[in-house]
Image: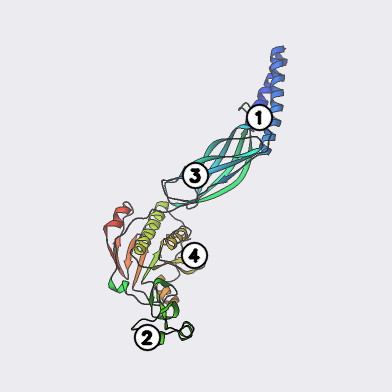
Amino acid sequence: MSSFINLFFVTIAAFYFALMYENAAIMLLAYLLAAFFVVSLFGVSFRVVMVKARLEIPVGISEPGKESIVRLVVTNGCPFPVRRIKALLSVEDRLNGKRTDSWMKLSAVPRGENALVGRLSFSDAGNYTVILKKLRVYDRTGLLHGDSKESSVADIQILPVLHEVPVQLTAATKNFCGESDVYDGHRSGDDSSELFQIREYREGDQLRDIHWKLTAKQEELMVKEHSFPKPCPVVLFLDFHPGKRLEKKERLISYMETAASLSFSIMDAGCPHYIVWYDGEEADLKRLRVEDEESLFYFIGMLMQIRWRQPKEEPVQRYREKYQMEPYVWALSLDEELQLRKGEEVVVRFSEKNLEQSLSQRELLL
């Protein structure tokens, strides 16, 4: 309403000079300004009440550097169009709390709904909240305006960049046999607790595997094939605990990119694995199995929401106590200095300044 305040003082000044100099022309101008002030005030106030907007982000996931579509849907209850509207958008980075504001120009059709499509680009990975803070509606002249506070909010997640890490699997990892409640859907095994399929008898099949009830029904020998468990021979520990405050967002982004790239490369090599981290809210270890793209991107989404805390006890030891019946071949640990340990040995320290090249130069033997 600052424009109306300025017009009000201009009108008062016109009346003042008209009375001081007894000038009819200035007095006419003052009356015209007063009439314009009253009509515009009621007109803009009516538009502010009748014009509403909401914020939409059709695709809530993107990558750094790529444009994301933002839709502002404007609903106009007035019987006439509103040619000029401005919306104040605020983008909040939830990792460091910083906000940036920008204005978008739009218009509204009479008694209807229309949408304006804008684009936002994010240079860094992270969780962002886009807020529609204010809607500024102008009168027909475009000189005067009124503001209405809006509360429409939309979230968008910018995923960290995935880099390829050379991974070579050893025979011990490929042939690892362990307990698992996940089974291979393409090959059979010897886990009698889970049935893979029932098929016709073939020479060499064991008598103990014959399905006698189905054999009697089918009047031919039918054999049960048991399932092949898919254990995780590799466990990747995320040992990141920078303290109560994160000094630099770039440090966390480098860590997330490194962790996500390691998990992606291990998965791409055909090795299911567990990701383990310390959950500050539950004060205990949490783990997630990664074996395909769906579970990988679920992990990345979880990775960007972790509240990092200093664990109360050594993570590897706590993991062995919590999952003592589930052995593994390799325990990898990635700390905040981007040092990757395999057991107690530091096998590589990745460079934060040139992360992509650093990740691709060293082959990881598992």
Residues at marks 1 and 3 touching, judged by CB atoms closer than 8 Å? no
Q: Is residue 210 something one can see in this rendering?
A: yes
Could you tell me how far apart the alpha carbons at marks 4 and 1 are, in whole angstroms? Answer: 52 Å
The first of marks 2 and 3 along the sequence is 3
At a point 31% along the width and 59% down the height, the residue shown is 165
The first of marks 4 and 1 along the sequence is 1
- Classify residue 183 by image quadrant: bottom left
Q: In the rendered view of the protein, which quadrant contains the C terminus?
A: bottom left
Q: Which residue is mark 2?
A: 206
Callout 4: few (<14), some (14-19), or many (20+) C-alpha neighbours within 10 Å? some
Nearer the viewer's eye, disc 1 or disc 3? 3
Q: Which mark is residue 5?
A: 1
Nearer the viewer's eye, disc 2 or disc 3? 2
Tell me the amino acid under the disc marked 3. Answer: Ile
Nearer the viewer's eye, disc 2 or disc 1? 2
The first of marks 4 and 2 along the sequence is 2
Q: Which residue is mark 4?
A: 280
* Residue 321 screen position, x and y as percent: 43, 77
Nearer the viewer's eye, disc 4 or disc 2? 2
Q: Which residue is mark 3?
A: 69
Q: In the rendered view of the protein, which quadrant contains the N terminus?
A: top right
Secondary structure of residue under mark 1 = helix
